[in-house]
Image: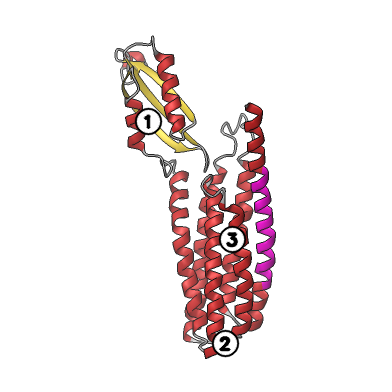
């Protein structure tokens, strides 16, 4: 059984690592091509989309780095290893994207009041390629998106990019048939809005985890009810729940019991319930009613 679990874990690590590498190569090539096409055909829609995609390439690189760091074994200086790097990277990725939004919006507003001629046909073709690249990259992360915040972030960004590229492609077709060059900066502004919308959840969740908040999907009150429902538990306090990484949750708590005779049974039951709730790193301190942690004589 242990060997089988190790094999599955190794497969997951290998497949995700391969997904990151393929995604980085595909998107780097497309960013270069899109930047060149944007400058050549004077399309702010293409340039802003390329800037967004460049941010996503950086996000993929950072996410892959954090993914690898999370596998490094703990040592005497970093007793949890480097697992927290996954949280910091997800926060950094969100910040990078929001900074990119500022540049895109500023350029779009400037061109909105000073429209320039754009080759709509070329814009549509380049954006069409982007739809394929982004959709394929999103597909690489789709099956693992609920297992890790960084993987979910990569999936959401690529899926949003595919939609953005669809918008740029449509703008190119509109420009080609109508000559409405103002559509190009309007699409740039819409891209900025889409980026903010798709990034806000990632920023909120990663900021919460970086501040050792209770991870999304973990109900603090429900955990308390489950602890209280265990036979032999009289009360509890000093409950702390936080993220070791984007995939691992930890809990510490003081558990009050009548006496220490059933302590091991209570501990096993509590750990099993918490494991079922997705909390695998559990540290419990047991106390009796006669000797609580806030009583000076029991310190």
**Residue under pointer 2:** 176
- Work out how far the residue at label 1 is from the one at label 2, CA to CA, in angstroms: 62 Å
Query: Which of pointers 1 and 2 lies earlier in the amino acid sequence?
Result: 2
Q: Is residue 224 left or right of residue 146?
A: left
Quarter of the image where one finds residue 28: bottom right
| Mark 3 burial class by Cα count in 10 Å: few <14, some 14-19, many 20+ | many
Q: Which mark is residue 56?
A: 3
| Residue at image coords 61%, 45% | 67
Q: How many labels were placed on the picture?
A: 3
Q: Is residue 102 left or right of residue 5?
A: left
Which quadrant holds the C terminus? top left
Q: Secondary structure at mark 3?
A: helix
**Residue under pointer 1:** 239
- The image shows residue 261, relative to residue 68, as above or below, that is above
Q: Which mark is residue 277?
A: none
| Residue at image coords 42%, 45% | 216
- Work out how far the residue at label 3 is from the one at label 2, CA to CA, in angstroms: 29 Å
What is the x, y in percent for residue 19? 65, 52
Q: Secondary structure at mark 1?
A: strand
Q: Which residues are magenta?
A: 14-33
Discs 3/2, front: 2
Q: Secondary structure at mark 2?
A: helix
Query: Which of pointers 1 and 3 lies earlier in the amino acid sequence?
Result: 3
| Residue at image coords 56%, 81% | 172
Q: Main secondary structure of the magenta part?
A: helix
- Work out how far the residue at label 1 is from the one at label 3, CA to CA, in angstroms: 37 Å
| Residue at image coords 50%, 67% | 101
Q: Is residue 63 magenta?
A: no
- The image shows residue 94, relative to residue 272, as above or below, that is below
Discs 1/2, front: 2
């Amino acid at each position: 059984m242990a060997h089988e679990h190790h094999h599955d874990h190794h497969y997951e690590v290998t497949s995700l690592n391969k997904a990151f590498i393929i995604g980085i190569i595909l998107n780097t090539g497309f960013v270069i091509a899109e930047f060149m096409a944007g400058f050549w055909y004077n399309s702010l829609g293409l340039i802003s989309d390329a800037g967004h995609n460049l941010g996503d390439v950086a996000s993929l690189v950072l996410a892959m780095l954090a993914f690898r760091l999370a596998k490094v074994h703990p040592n005497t200086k970093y007793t949890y290893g480097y697992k927290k790097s996954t949280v910091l990277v997800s926060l950094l990725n969100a910040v990078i994207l929001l900074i990119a939004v500022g540049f895109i919006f500023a350029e779009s507003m400037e061109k909105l009041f000073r429209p320039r001629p754009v080759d709509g046909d070329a814009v549509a073709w380049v954006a069409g390629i982007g739809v394929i690249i982004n959709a394929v990259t999103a597909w690489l992360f789709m099956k693992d998106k609920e297992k890790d915040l960084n993987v979910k972030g990569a999936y959401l960004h690529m899926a949003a990019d595919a939609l953005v590229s669809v918008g740029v492609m449509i703008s190119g077709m509109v420009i080609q048939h109508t000559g409405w060059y103002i559509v190009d900066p309007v699409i740039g502004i819409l891209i900025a809005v889409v980026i903010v919308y798709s990034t806000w959840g990632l920023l909120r969740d990663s900021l919460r985890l970086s501040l050792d908040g209770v991870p999304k999907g973990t109900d603090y009150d429900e955990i308390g009810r489950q602890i209280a429902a265990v036979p032999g538990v009289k009360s509890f306090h000093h409950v702390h729940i936080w993220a070791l990484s984007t995939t691992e949750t930890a809990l510490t708590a003081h558990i009050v019991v009548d006496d220490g005779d059933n302590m091991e049974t209570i501990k096993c039951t509590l750990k099993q319930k918490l494991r079922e709730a997705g909390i695998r790193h559990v540290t419990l301190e047991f106390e009796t009613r006669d000797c609580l942690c806030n009583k000076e004589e029991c310190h």
